[in-house]
Image (cartoon, helix red, strand yellow):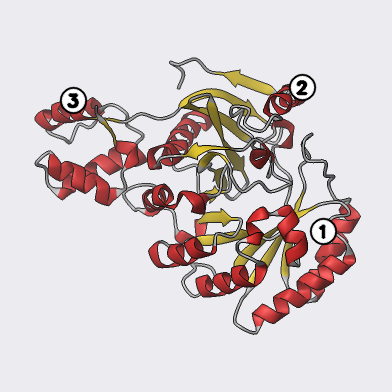
């Protein structure tokens, strides 16, 4: 069985080359060919000796995930569905802006956290993705987009681990993938431009601070434990005080001088004036210990199984005003890609029905896709 080179960070690639009797600089050459140039065939690697190319051809391969379909939104957002086997499909979303191109990457097929407002969690958990499956999303998207948009330079400037799954519950596979993203011989992204989003796995926040401190986004969604435990079940294990203490510790290593807190705005649930005031008081308490924060208010993207409703925009703006007047940097996220179910909280991936609602949700999605450009790709499509 041959080895998929997308599974390796540079250290792993160097170890693999040593097994082939090659020196470390060969790993660097391979890394550049694969990640910077998008090579998938060893014959393309013209600065490698023919004997080495032949050896690689029988011992390794460069294989991306199979693309099931591509959906393009009216706002330019692109969503890919990738087949990861056993009936599971993951989703990856590219969000173009005038000054950046952001790729939202999945870390798991499904999710075990089960947040009430998240479509992925309602379908249950299937499995962790491998490092190769995580990095494959970036590898494919970057080199597809260069051709699709007719650009010779890098298209993806930012990566957010905000797709399907809880990244910190797949830490062993996440860490090498992050290193590939950051490596100058790989994608050369700065730590400020790679964000890991977590629902609050406290011990792994501390590990990430030691191993690979990138930008951190924390799904908070409530100002007190009773409400957050209802919305984010993981809060029962790692309550808000423990989570914010971990964020304070992380900040000393983080590439930004603040931690981003995500707050999904749910009508009548967590969007009332008293919730905003409670949030201000909570942040004041932890600011004394050195926590600096930014809040990103996210208009909820409805899906049939949630039973929840998006907050009315006047409520969102009033909530934001309360935070801003208290000196808390606050933004309201612009909804992107909701016409193709690519917006925050909507990624569900057509995983096998593990909770009894998956088939109904898939049918709903097909109905919502009416009129949207959908490209279904065969096995030979690039």
Above/below status of 42 relative to 30: above
Residue 136 percent across, percent down from the top left? 42, 36
| Image quadrant containing the N terminus | top left
Tell me the residue at 57%/70% (across/down).
247
Tell me the residue at 66%/62% (across/down).
261
Residue 212 percent across, percent down from the top left? 41, 61
Q: Quadrant of residue 228?
A: bottom right
Q: Quadrant of residue 2?
A: top left
Task: Give the CA separation, mark 3 to mark 2.
Answer: 46 Å
What is the count of numbered marks?
3
Report which residue position mark 2 lands on. 367
Tell me the residue at 55%/70% (across/down).
246
**Mark nearer the N terminus (3 vs 2):** 3
SS category of the residue bearing label 2: helix
Circle 1 packing at 10 Å, graded few (<14), some (14-19), many (20+), is: many
**Mark nearer the N terminus (1 vs 2):** 1
Above/below status of 61 relative to 174: above
- Label 3–label 2 contact, CB within 8 A: no
Task: Give the CA separation, mark 3 to mark 1.
Answer: 57 Å
| Image quadrant containing the C terminus | top left
Q: Nearer the viewer, residue 222 or 234?
A: 234
Task: Give the CA separation, mark 1 to mark 2.
Answer: 30 Å
Residue 96 visible in the displayed image? yes
Above/below status of 17 relative to 2: below
Circle 2 packing at 10 Å, graded few (<14), some (14-19), many (20+), is: few
The circle on residue 58 is 3
Report which residue position mark 1 lands on. 270
The circle on residue 143 is none
């Amino acid at each position: 069985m041959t080895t998929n080179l997308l599974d390796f960070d540079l250290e792993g690639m160097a170890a693999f080359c040593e097994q082939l009797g090659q020196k470390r600089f060969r790993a660097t050459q391979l890394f550049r060919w694969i990640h910077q140039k998008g090579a998938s065939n060893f014959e393309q690697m013209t600065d490698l000796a023919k004997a080495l190319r032949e050896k690689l051809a029988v011992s390794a391969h460069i294989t991306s995930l199979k693309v099931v379909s591509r959906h393009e939104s009216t706002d330019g957002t692109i969503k890919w569905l990738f087949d990861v086997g056993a009936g599971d499909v993951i989703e990856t979303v590219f969000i173009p802006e005038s000054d950046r191109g952001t790729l939202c990457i999945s870390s798991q097929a499904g999710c075990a956290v089960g947040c009430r407002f998240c479509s992925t969690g309602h379908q249950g958990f299937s499995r962790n993705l491998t490092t190769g499956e995580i990095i494959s999303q970036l590898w494919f998207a970057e080199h597809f987009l260069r051709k699709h948009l007719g650009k010779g330079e890098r298209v993806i400037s930012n990566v957010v681990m905000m797709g399907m799954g809880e990244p910190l519950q797949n830490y062993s596979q996440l860490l090498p993938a992050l290193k590939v993203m950051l490596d100058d011989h790989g994608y050369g992204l700065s730590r400020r431009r790679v964000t890991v989003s977590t629902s609050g796995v406290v011990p792994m926040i501390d590990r990430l601070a030691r191993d690979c401190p990138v930008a951190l986004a924390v799904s908070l969604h409530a100002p007190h434990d009773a409400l957050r435990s209802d919305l984010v079940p993981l809060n029962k294990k790692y309550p808000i005080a423990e989570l914010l203490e971990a964020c304070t510790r992380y900040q000393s290593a983080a590439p930004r001088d603040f931690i981003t807190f995500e707050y999904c705005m749910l009508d009548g649930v967590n969007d009332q004036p008293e919730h905003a005031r409670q949030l201000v008081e909570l942040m004041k308490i932890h600011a004394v210990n050195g926590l600096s924060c930014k809040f990103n208010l996210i208009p909820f993207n409805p899906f049939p199984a949630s039973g929840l409703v998006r907050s009315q925009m006047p409520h969102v703006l009033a909530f934001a005003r309360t935070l801003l007047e208290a000196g808390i940097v606050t933004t309201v996220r612009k909804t992107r890609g909701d016409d193709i179910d690519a917006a925050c909280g909507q990624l569900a991936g057509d995983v096998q029905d593990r909770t009894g609602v998956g088939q109904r949700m898939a049918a709903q999605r097909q109905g919502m896709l009416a009129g949207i450009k959908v490209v279904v790709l065969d096995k030979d499509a690039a």
